[in-house]
Amino acid sequence: MCSRSAKNGVTMQEIWEAKSRIKPIVKETPLIQSSILKEKMDASVYLKLENLHEIGAFKVRGAANKMSSLTDEEKAHGVTTFSTGNHGLAVAYVAKQLGIRAVICISNRVPDAKVHAIEQLEAEVVKVGESQDEAEKYCQKLEKTEKLTIIKPFDDPFVIAGQGTIGIELIEKVPAIDAAIIPLSGGGLFAGIGLALKAYNPDVKLIGVSMEKSAVMAESLKAGKPVILPESDTLADSLLGGIGLNNEYTFSLVRDLIDEMIHVSEAEIAAGMAFILDQHRMVVEGAAAAGVAAMLSNKCNINAQHIATIVTGNNVNTSVVSDVLYNQLNNPVIRW
Ligand SMILES: *Cc1c(COP(=O)(O)O)cnc(C)c1O
């Protein structure tokens, strides 16, 4: 079944299989157009609304594909992960849908609001140590002692194929898409969508977008190998985190697929969030506004007719949204 065209690759067939596998759990998301961005880019601009999933982020796709593919024995033992952000929520949500046990390992530094969101999905939360690293080690211990399967956030062919289903949905609605601007962190989203779009149109332009500081994938691509960077405060907190020094899949896939990398400033990310709120009446998180920010800031000069960007999620504190909106109304860096 799951034949791979190349070592460390993911095939189009696996993305098609993912599409039917996740269907019982994941709804298709809408695609809308922006008239202001159309004028600005001199091209049709489409926003793929991955913020509208029940858990508020696309990560449910990868988690659903991976967890639905487990053997009955693996499902009976359950799963574990150490991510606290959207991936942790996705694993907890899918586990509930499939009726399997999920243990989310977090450090004592994780805010209570996040812990409660995961507990509401009936997942078990284990608090260990003071850092992500300690939580990860505990996960590995659970893998051995309780036979739980670790669900990785991006560096897994099933997760990549799950995120790639966004690419199929894009092509089904707008076959003429010739450029995509994709928020980039660990690269599961970029690799999955990139594979699907390039398989359909080898000339499609694939643009990654990250914040300015702590853009680990971008720095790793420059260095030619995975690197480690300290984390910095950013509105795009979902784009933080390493890619793993032993990265097996996403580093080489992103390296081979990417045409251009764009970095957006905090002010530009804020403008992107305010734009989506003002123009499309939706609250989104910083990472989700990065593609719109790249276009609003004139940093994206591509020669394309049909540009898609992914609005990846909506998990942001109301106080952050309030600040962003206040600044846009009183002291705007970008106007539209
Ligand atoms: C995880 C995430 C991303 C980045 O996805 P990767 O596969 O890690 O590159 C972007 N936006 C949001 C909201 C996310 O949760």
Image: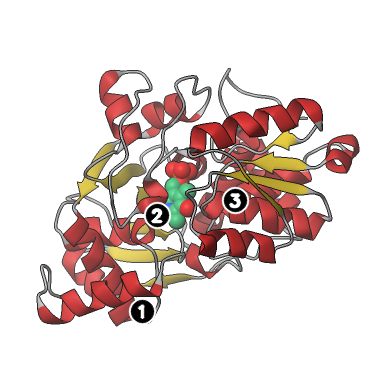
Q: Could you tell me which residue is drawn at 72 percent across and 58 percent down?
A: 23
User: Which quadrant of the rendered structure holds the N terminus?
Assistant: top right
Residue 304 locus on image (x, y percent): 26, 53
Residue 197, visible in the rendered structure: no
Kindly identify which numbered label has been placed on residue 209.
none
Badge 3 marks a residue whose secondary structure is helix
Vertical placement of 125 versus 221: above or below?
below
Kindly identify which numbered label has been placed on residue 177.
2
Q: Could you tell me which residue is drawn at 9 percent across and 75 percent down?
A: 331
When asked about the image quadrant of residue 76, the answer is top right
Q: Amino acid at mark 2?
A: Ile
In this rendering, would 122 be left or right of 4? right
**Label 2: how many residues lie within 10 Å, few (<14), some (14-19) or many (20+)?**
many
Q: Are marks 1 and 3 in contact (CB under 8 Å)?
A: no
Q: Could you tell me which residue is drawn at 58 percent across and 66 percent down?
A: 53
Does label 1 point to a residue whose CB lies under 8 Å from ligand 1?
Answer: no
Task: Between label 1 and label 2, give the one nearer the viewer.
Answer: 1
In this rendering, would 262 be left or right of 287? left
Residue 196 locus on image (x, y percent): 52, 43
Badge 1 marks a residue whose secondary structure is helix
Q: CA distance from mark 3 to mark 2?
A: 31 Å
Q: Amino acid at mark 3?
A: Gly
Vertical placement of 174 versus 320: above or below?
above
- Badge 1 is on which residue? 280
Q: Indicate which disc, 1 or 2, sits on the residue closer to the N terminus.
A: 2
- Badge 3 is on which residue? 88
Q: Nearer the viewer, residue 77 or 274?
A: 77
Q: Indicate which disc, 3 or 2, sits on the residue closer to the N terminus.
A: 3
Q: Indicate which disc, 1 or 3, sits on the residue closer to the N terminus.
A: 3
Vertical placement of 214 versus 87: above or below?
above
